[in-house]
Amino acid sequence: MSSIKELQEEIIDEFSMFEDWMGKYEHLIEYGKSLSLLDDKFKTEEYEVRGCQAKVWLHTQITEGKLIFEADSDAIITKGIIGLLVYVLSNHDVDEILETELYFINEIGLREHLSPTRSNGLVSMIKQMKIYALGYKAKA
């Protein structure tokens, strides 16, 4: 299993292959398509990420000491963003998630190419994932 840092480096390499943002957006959308289907029972207000313009649902569980994230969105770019975050943060232990700075977002230029509302949504998604990690740490 790759570390979060290794996954971030992999994403930076992937996105560097695209010369323009249309290619990068298409690649981002592929991350959304790669998400496993989120059970409809998690597409409720309880699992909705606050602060996103689009609907984003995030569910988590802990398995063998690793936090597993599942997510979905009703908007294609937003689904790509949460797919990217799930790819990087899922299957890692709580401490690694909490201690990690997600530098790849700035490195690939994602934040600067999002509308202000999508950028706020990105921050909300990261915050919610870290809140879930904190919750599991508190239970431990």
Image (spheres, rainbow, N blue to C red):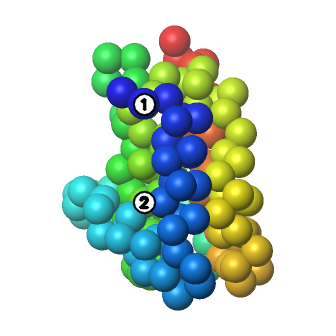
Amino acid type, residue under disc 2 in the picture = Gly
Against 70, residue 32 (above or below) is: below
Q: Which mark is residue 38?
A: none
For disc 2, the marked residue is: 83
- Density class for disc 2 (Cα within 10 Å; few <14, some 14-19, many ≥20) is many
Say whether residue 67 is left or right of residue 128: left
Extreme top residue here?
Answer: 140
Q: Nearer the viewer, residue 18 or 102?
A: 18
**Kind of element beneath mark 1:** loop
> Is the N terminus in the top left, top right, bottom left or bottom right quadrant?
top left
* Front position in the image: 36 or 136: 36
Residue 137 percent across, percent down from the top left: 57, 20
Marker disc for residue 2? 1
Query: Residue, x 42% and y 60% (percent of image)?
Result: 83
Identify the element where label 2 is drawn: helix
Task: Place residue 121 in its image quadrant.
Answer: bottom right
The amino acid type, in three-letter code, at marker 1 is Ser
Q: Is residue 69 visible?
A: yes
Q: Residue at x 57, y 44 (%)?
A: 9
Tell me which residue sits at (51%, 12%) in the image.
Answer: 140
x, y (%) of residue 71?
A: 39, 57
- Label 1: how many residues lie within 10 Å, few (<14), some (14-19) or many (20+)? few
Residue 50 shows in this picture:
no
Q: Relative to 140, is 126 on the left or the right?
A: right
**Above or below: residue 16 compared with residue 89:** below
